[in-house]
Image: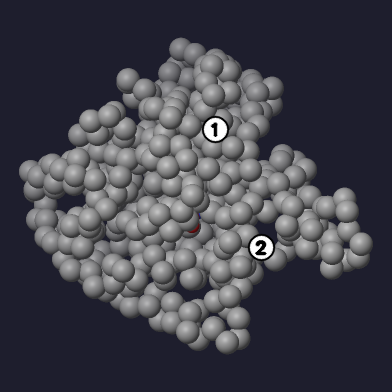
Amino acid sequence: MNHTPLAYSEIRRELLAGKYTCVEVVQGHLAQISLCNDQLNAFLTVYAEEALLRAAEIDVKIKEGNAGPLAGLVVGIKDLLCYADHPSQAGSQILNGFKSTFSATAVQRLLDADAIIIGRQNCDEFGMGSTNENSSFGPVLNYANPSHVAGGSSGGSAVAVQAGMCQVSLGTDTGGSIRMPAAFCGIMGLKPTYGRVSRWGLIAYASSFDTIGPMGHHVDDLALVLQTIEGKDGYDSTLMEDVASTYVSNKRVAYIKEIVEHPSLQVEIRDAFFEQVTQMKNAGYEVISVDFPFIDQLLPTYYVLTTAEASSNLARFDGVKFGYRTNDASDLMDMYKKTRDEAFGEEVKRRIMLGTFVLSADYYDAYYTKAQQVRRLIQERTLDVLSTCDFIVSPTTSSTAYKLGEKTLDPLQMYLGDLFTVQANITGLPALSIPMGVDSSGLPMGFQITGRAFDEQGLFEFAKSIER
Ligand code: GLN
């Protein structure tokens, strides 16, 4: 907590110099896991023995001089990602007992680069939530103050990094699930451009929004992981060509007036944000305020479209092919109903019903079609801003981490917390959250940078130029 752990490049230097071994690195993280995971609940399963065995194998490779580019990088993966022959449950009871027969492309590419996977991490059920309190395995607690939430839905992934239980995590972001917990936990998290990282092996929530991205303490670590997991994959036809190389930097940055003036924004966060703006100006950037007339449409658009996609994606969990099946069914229909009723949590059921409603014949045009049209308007206006500015900056969240239970009774209050993060998913653009200090009660705050499509490199360089 008090000092930032070493970046991977520094660890790698020591490993290659024989100062210590991968086995020792893994042992260090396992010790930290034994110390705090029971309380924090970040890891659902720890692959201790396996990680040590792999570390020993990689130590041999290091000695032989043929270790991969991520040798000894200790990674945790969110429970929404498949890892061959290991459990993946999406934080849900409906996938109880499920083990994937293949690995997600992102996971496989990390393994191929000699990273070490140390465990699977707690998250909101199917990624639906902003605090990790919707996990069927119980909430994840914030290491900065355990009476507060970790943020969600990649809460386990954030806290595992925050508490030093692994070096980096692989999270997923559909509406803010990497950036929000990163902000709540004082670490960094990147939501890549939609179409940059294969979604193969990511248990789908809302397929036109879902992304996989890295969380860690250092920009360079995020860049390294992204470089490893990105790029063409025959299993995901939505992957696109990199277009960023044609961009010209304007050294101009925008913030959205309606966001920094939003009544929900905590005063200390606004102050910290404007300090950051001063820092940007000192670093030679022109910072301008722009209008964004669709601020009130962001959340409705996001929640109509994602629940519609979720209602379709989650139809496959029927007790026949995967995971849980009820014990007490009189016929097939009854089996489907009881299985889903018994094993899905409340929030997931709420979203399936909402999604089914907005897709129903009588309401399709009024909700689903309308939301698609508004999605386009939001995209156009956002791209318009980015045609003259390199980045759009904002606080990542309007407040610091909530107290446990503070938002669970009112789903709408919970959804409001996603206001600053969903724009990047609606538009498909890349967005990075970096730490922005702590508030007066010691809780971390986050600074969000959204960039042009495929300009992750620009985000990383910008983040470094304004780092505190
Ligand atoms: N909090 C948002 C939601 O509940 C975002 C979730 C996510 O990015 N997976 O949908």
Residue toward you, 12 or 189: 189
Q: Quadrant of the N terminus?
A: top left
Residue toward you, 209 or 261: 261
Q: Quadrant of the C terminus?
A: top left
The amino acid type found where label 1 is placed reads: Ala
The amino acid type found where label 2 is placed reads: Leu
**Left or right of 250, for residue 424:** right
Q: Mark 2 sits on what residue?
A: 314
In percent of width and height, residue 435 lies at 29, 38
Res 406 seen here: yes
- Mark 2, secondary structure of its residue: helix
Above or below residue 384? Residue 325 is above
Residue 348, quarter of picture:
bottom right
Q: Residues within 10 Å of mark 1 (few under 14, many from 20)?
A: many
In percent of width and height, residue 20 lies at 49, 13
| Disc on the earlier residue, 2 or 1 | 1
Q: Is mark 1 within 8 Å of ligand 1?
A: no
**Left or right of 442, for residue 34:** right
Task: Name the residue located 41 percent from the left edge and 62 percent from the top edge.
Answer: 425
Residue 406, quarter of picture:
top left
**Left or right of 142, for residue 296:** left
Task: Name the residue located 42 percent from the left edge and 71 percent from the top edge.
Answer: 301
- Mark 1, secondary structure of its residue: loop
Task: Name the residue located 18 percent from the left edge and 68 percent from the top edge.
Answer: 291
Farthest top residue?
19
Task: Name the residue located 30 percent from the left edge and 45 percent from the top edge.
Answer: 399
Q: Mark 1 sits on what residue?
A: 42
Above or below residue 270? Residue 374 is below
**Left or right of 345, for residue 256:** left
